[in-house]
Image (cartoon, grey):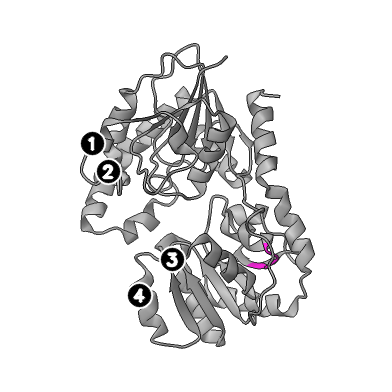
Amino acid sequence: MKKVALIHYWLTNMRGGENVTAEFCKLFPDADIFTHAWNPEKVKEPFNSHKIIESFISRLPLARKKCQIYLPLMPSALARLDFSSYDLILSNESGPSKGIRKPPTARHVCYCNTPMRYVWDMFDDYYRAAGLGGKIAMRLFKNYMRKYDLKSADNVDQFLANSNFIAARIKRIYGRDSIVVYPPVDTDYFVREESDGTRDYYLVAGQLISYKRPELALRACLKMHRKLVLVGDGPMRPQLEKEAAGNPDIIFAGRATRPQLRKYYAEAKGLIFPGIEDFGIVPLESQSVGVPVIALGIGGALETVVSGKTGIFFPEQTVDSLCHAIEEFEAVRFDRQTIIDHAQKFHRDVFVQKMRDVLGLN
């Protein structure tokens, strides 16, 4: 039987990337997991049933909470991990995780959510949002991390991309072809429920950070006098609250539990998704409960939203462009069951079967 190693950059929160690795854990119940740092209070099942090997970064201050501050040390940390006894290495990449010392007899398959955004395509966005110390570090280590990232791609035998959008980015940056395997969506959980909500509000769900552009949704709804609920938290919240200035139509719901999030989806008129995402799980969770999406027509949303059927696209990241899309959205009569049926195409079983096909497990 093949010995399998799973690699995840850091296991400190449960988000889309961690959900992918969780499926890898189920696919390989005897696999060992390598990561820079693991926070067992935040990341539990199914990870805690596996042997987890952490790099030396886990012993550094704050590593289990803010592991990314040690980004420049991660190449050295990865090089010290021993993979000599493994036959299959399956890495999950959007930070540095693929730069290992691969044994010549092992096969390394890298599931790439994206090449590192903060040193490539979205460097300027992250730089603008960083504090003074972050700006200095980004300038100092940008070229070093780019060179390392390019070199580490040579350790990969097969790239998998989470969308066609990312497959094109992998080709442009690494010069490598990849197989697209869409990440799993928990459509069994995000289901339509009967609700006594009025469905009179638009919804923004996710971190309130600059590259996700939540201010576009806020400003468009303020301009059009539409009700907006923002679910999530982040560094942009104080600025957004200031812009809303106590307007009763703008509600900051903060972080939500999964049951609360499902309820917010179910009672929304529509989801507004104004950022450029590599794939974007949130629009599919919304569609899974039958709620259509207003999305920027760039990035992964083009692969998850069907214009005129499950949502509406707007072409530019401007308030006026989004306002025009809201007007168009409100003129369309969406069929809820059509939206739900579309989301089912991204069910976790579809992901698992595609991974089995790619890895030759059938």
User: Do callouts 2 and 3 mark residues in contact (Cβ within 8 Å)?
Assistant: no
* Magenta residues, dominant SS class: loop
* Residue that badge 2 annotates: 63
> Magenta residues, as a range?
289-293
Measured along the vertical axis of the image, is residue 278 above or below residue 226?
Answer: above
Residue 218 coordinates in the image, percent (x, y): 48, 77
Q: Which mark is residue 239?
A: 4
Answer yes or no: is residue 314 visible: no
Quadrant location, the C terminus: top right
The residues tagged by marks 4 and 3 sit, at their Cα atoms, a distance apart of: 17 Å
Q: Badge 1 is on which residue?
A: 59
Q: Mark 1 belongs to which amino acid?
A: Arg
Decide if residue 9 is on the left or right side of residue 91: left
Q: Using the rendered view, name the quadrant where residue 233 is placed.
A: bottom left
* Marks 4/1: CA–CA distance: 35 Å
Q: Earlier in the sequence, mark 4 or mark 1?
A: 1
Disc nearer the start of the sequence (2/3): 2
Residue at x 59% of width, y 31% of height: 27
N-terminal of the pair, mark 3 or mark 1, is: 1
